[in-house]
Amino acid sequence: MPHTPVTAGNLHAGLPAAPRPDELFEPLLTTPGVRIERIVSTGQVTPDGEWYDQDTDEWVLLTAGLARLRIDGEDEDRALAPGDWLYLPAHCRHRVTWTQAAPPTIWLAVHVG
Amino acid sequence: MPHTPVTAGNLHAGLPAAPRPDELFEPLLTTPGVRIERIVSTGQVTPDGEWYDQDTDEWVLLTAGLARLRIDGEDEDRALAPGDWLYLPAHCRHRVTWTQAAPPTIWLAVHVG
């Protein structure tokens, strides 16, 4: 028998019944080197003029809904649909410009380091 | 501009047109602490009497298809559908007892450490 228990869940369970004012962040795994979380967006975007500029690398997968993402230095938003993934190295400035509100948009984010 | 380039893809693209003899393993991100890969199963299972017994922790998500997984010490298989995830600590012995062949079963595996 393992010493650490198996944990399990479903990324598409426990969703908010209606759009919320804020995004929902739910940790799924936290270790010294990796943090995996589910993010549920219901229409939220990065505020005008702001960018995410993270100290850690992020690998992100969209599993439901739709979104648009702008990477600093690119001329157009990237349109994201279920199954689309992106690897955003640390300090790769990016902003979320649109998310589908209903049904919710679900992201799996793997933060490395 | 970032020093490391952004990479991107879609987990459900580039699938085999027909069931294959072997599972398909595709690395998506390899860093010193984390390895993310896509696994495409088309009916493969762990051979009778064998178990996966890994030195590293694995966080795994099923994104398409269906599968059944047995964890050593449990009385029944776990049935997995899209969105289902499991955290399998190192040396948690487990075996895949069934995978849907067509359309293919797609796994995202995050190997930690």
Image (tube, coloured by chain):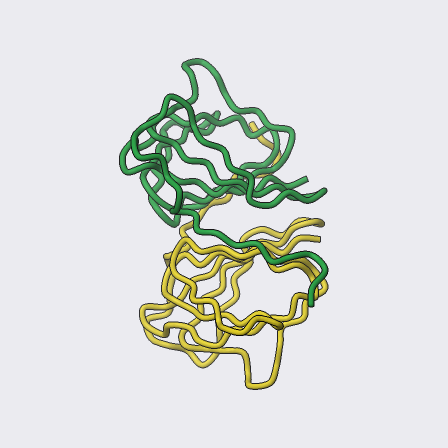
Chain colours: A green, B yellow
Q: Is residue A20 above or below residue B28?
A: above
Q: In this view, does A83 lie above or below A80?
A: below
Q: Seen from this angle, which residue lies furthest front?
A: B75
> Where is residue A12 shown, x and y percent of the image?
38, 47
**Horizontal and vertical percent position of residue B60:** 53, 57
Out of B8 and B50, give the one closest to the viewer.
B50
Which image quarter is the N terminus of chain A in?
bottom right
Report the side of B29 relative to A80 (left or right): right
Count the marks: how many? 0
Left or right relative to A99: residue A87: right
Q: Residue at x 47, y 67 (%)?
A: B78
Q: Position of residue B106 (x, y in %)?
A: 42, 62
Give me the residue at 36% from left, 29% from top. A76
Q: Quadrant of residue A47?
A: top left
Q: What is the quadrant of the C terminus of chain A in the image? A: top right
Q: Which residue lies furthest to the left in this view?
A: A102
Q: In which quarter of the image is residue B14?
A: bottom left
Q: In this view, does B11 lie above or below B23?
A: above
Q: Looking at the image, which residue is at 56% across and 74% down? A: B95
Q: Which residue lies furthest to the top in this view?
A: A49
The image quadrant of residue B49 is bottom right
Tell which of B8 and B12 is nearer to you: B12
Residue at the (53%, 40%) spot, across then down: A37
Which of B107 and A22 lies nearest the eye of the viewer? A22
Residue B76, given in percent of the width and then of the height, sits at: 50, 73
